[in-house]
Image: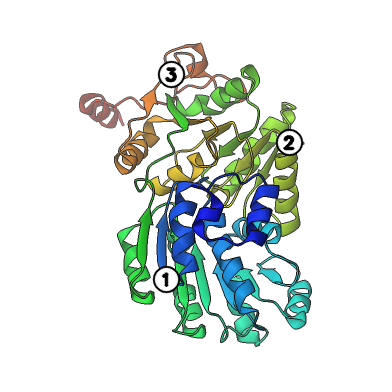
Amino acid sequence: MTFSDLGLRDALLNKCESLDYSEPTPIQEQAIPVVLDGADLIGCAETGTGKTAAFLLPIIQRLAARNKPGVKVLIVAPTRELVMQIEQEYIKFANKKMRCVSIIGGASMNRQLNALRRGVNVIIATPGRLLDHVKRGTVNLATVDTLVLDEADRMLDMGFLPAIKEILSNVPSKRQTLLFSATISDSIKTLAYSMMDDPEVIEVSRQNRTARTVNQVAYPVATASKTALLLDLLETNNFEKVLVFTRTKRGADRIAHILTARELRANRIHSNLSQSQRERALKNFKIGKTRILVATDIASRGIDVDSVSHVINYDVPEAPEDYVHRVGRTGRAGNEGQAITLVTPNEELAMRGIERLTEQKVDRVVLPDFNGNGPMGLLNGSGKQNRSNGFKKKRSGRAFRSRRSRK
């Protein structure tokens, strides 16, 4: 199967060839003809399998054929990083006459207003800033005939359901609606069927499964030894490009500071940083200026970086679905990748929840120096000895009562 077999015209075929898109991925192979036909679509595929091009290529072809003024395509995504990634892909394929603008929080409102005044055909936006423009009257969605919700499950997780409903009330009911995601939950299906007209469902991989190209391993670790283990992994192995995920923004700042102090060329990215800081951190990671990027789950989707060799889950994510998306940052486009998870005793239950969701057993590899049974098990991240090895000992009832009786 080639892109020409899917019904794409010469202009886009030439673009694909120039960008080394030699043959379509499974999601592209199945989705492109459906979108070209104008049908509604729910698309589910593993991350890194070309979902963005699966909807952009046919949308651009249909947009070129219509050649009408006004906003015709609205693409909504949950994070700024994902919006910018989609915009970059759009610019690669579309001709300059089909103007687009990204509308995201934290970016210049004046730049967005100037682009809107000049006239655009495509808006790629996060929900909050888009609704800001709608309320100001600077965006008119009445001419939209194609709506795309990308990473819709993430938008629901982030509490964007009211915003999505408000956006839907501002676009025409007669439209083409496309919903793409790596995972499709029952709540997403309920939303999809409520706003779509007899959608075709394409699922090229089993839901909630990690890519086969990712080798996964978990290291049981004493709580006090987690940072020491992370440092040991990064300093004794020649990992090329590493994403380290923490559960909190404060944790990302702390880990990035420790790694930088050890001269490991690290930076961090999370929602408390300004847009320019986030863009700079991501750019430096892409070009290899920094080798390690410490991130919260805001970056688990939307970071499209070539050749991420390793993902390290410093903290096990609270939501099992987030594990799928974190791990999906490596092993992309057929490349091999490795996902490492550091699991403390308190996180073991969450790790088992991930295994139930993905229906995949993650091998545990015990490192005696770090799991509380060796000398490193008594060290914290700074090398100082702790009284506890990270595993709580159950206190006997008799001993407890005797202490109370002595008071």
Q: Give the SS element for disc 3.
A: loop
Is 213 placed left or right of 264 in the picture? Answer: left
Is 306 placed left or right of 229 in the picture? Answer: right
- Residue 277 in the image, given as x and y percentages of width and height: 74, 52
- The residue located at (32%, 41%) in the rendering is 353
What amino acid is found at the position of numbered circle 3 in the picture? Gly
- The residue located at (59%, 44%) in the rendering is 22
Q: Which mark is residue 39?
A: 1
Is 71 placed left or right of 328 in the picture? Answer: right
Residue 332, relative to residue 6: is it above or below?
above
Of marks 3 and 1, the one in the foreground: 1
Q: Which residue is mark 2?
A: 290
Q: Between marks 3 and 2, how big is the CA–CA gap?
A: 32 Å
Extreme-left residue of the structure: 398
Local packing at callout 3 (Cα closer than 10 Å; few below 14, some 14-19, many 20+) is many
Q: Between marks 3 and 1, how big is the CA–CA gap?
A: 57 Å
Residue 36, relative to residue 357: is it above or below?
below
What amino acid is found at the position of numbered circle 2 in the picture? Thr
Q: Which mark is residue 372?
A: 3
Q: Between marks 1 and 2, how big is the CA–CA gap?
A: 43 Å
Between discs 3 and 2, the one toward the N terminus = 2
Q: Nearer the viewer, residue 391 or 323?
A: 323
Q: Give the SS element for disc 1.
A: loop
- The residue located at (43%, 31%) in the rendering is 343
Residue 345, relative to residue 78: is it above or below?
above
